[in-house]
Amino acid sequence: MSNPLETFDVAVVGLGALGSAAAYHLAKRGVRTVAFEQFDLGHVRGASHDTSRIIRTSYGATRYVRLATSAYQDWADFEKVAGERLVTVTGGVIFLPADGPYSAGDFTGSLTEVGVPYELLDPDQVRARWPQFDIPENVETVYTPDTGIVNASRTVAALQMQARAHGAELRARTPVTALRPGGAGTVLETAAGPVRARKVVLAADAWTNRLLAPLDAAIPLETMQEQVTYFKPADAEAFDPDRFPVWIWEDTDCFYGFPAYGEPTVKAARDVSNNLMTPEDRTFEPSAELLDQLSAFMGATIPASGHVLRTVTCQYAITPDREFVLSPLARYPDIIVALGAGHAFKFTPAIGRILAELALDGESTDDISAFAAPGSAA
């Protein structure tokens, strides 16, 4: 006689930032939760490793500003639970060339609508406040004082620790190879044998369609290898967080960077470099062409940023228009998909809470109507 399947209330697939946050929030609510990670916990194959990520409310779309303001409260709540500081507020600037594809008015309009404080600065004001920048005359700058940095690897580790403390089972090095939805929940085929769950949270990022394609429910995704570079300035104190902000250059080619954080370096990168490759094809080797492009930009825009120290790769899975997907599937409503499109880390604890709400309550207290899976009702 065969043994009955292990059965859980909710199974989480993927233990990067979003999956770890979902596992924590589910376990905190007292439901029997299992979570699977195909690699080691804290691995470097996805998009949740390394040290720093930007946290900000400064978006050109109101739906993201609203979600970000909600996330700030979730970050504060989780810091109390974790007993450690994960968010460092530095202030931040968005640089918007007047002849570029993005409008400062979109940012100031959405911030105004939600009631988030900001300043609109001209190049002279930017240079007076932060002489480290050399900003051309045709650039508008939106400054938000609440922008800052979150510690990426520490956040994921803390979420996993708290998930376990609340009773979740985290199973590393256990790939999920198939999802088999049925009337009594979904059977997850794993490398260690099948389990059944009433609900599934799929937070597998670049690996999402491996499990959705056999269900004829694939989501359009472009996967690419990204890279960030650490520069070594001669005067590291000039880039201390109390003297230099987080910054984003919004143009046809977008760049972003950080003040010194945990070490006397300046981290910067191009966003969405379109260095397309699948997880199977990833080289983990930085692109010399992209590094040259970034170095030229840094030399022109932040001349004292210094020489290249090291470059680290990560992976993006980009949805059309970079919209989040936070919703059940239309055909399989017991499978809830979480895709962050390469800009979700700042929302991590809020998205984890939202995923738990979708799994347990069927709806979220946040307005996530814009983040429905293709074919699903808004």
Image (cartoon, helix red, strand yellow):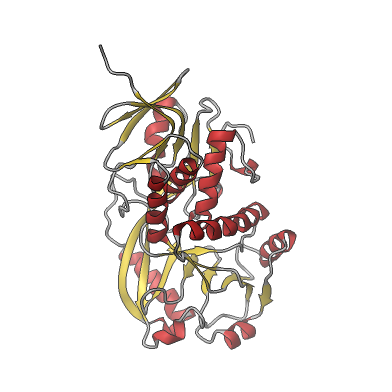
Place residue 280 in its image quadrant. Answer: top left
Image coordinates for residue 243, horizontal then vertical, percent:
51, 83
Depth order, front residue of 148/271: 148
Residue at the spot 54% in from the left edge and 46% down from the top edge: 353
Depth order, front residue of 316/167: 167
How many numbered badges does the structure rendering display?
0
Quick one: which residue is furthest to the top in this view?
1
Place residue 269 in its image quadrant. Answer: bottom left
Residue 50 as seen in the image, left or right of residue 132: left
Q: Which image quarter is the N terminus in?
A: top left
> Can the viewer see residue 253 in this picture?
no
> Can the viewer see residue 363 in this picture?
yes
Depth order, front residue of 138/109: 109
Image coordinates for residue 378, horizontal then vertical, percent:
64, 36
Question: Looking at the image, is 14 positioned above or below residue 1?
Answer: below
Image coordinates for residue 377, horizontal then vertical, percent:
63, 32
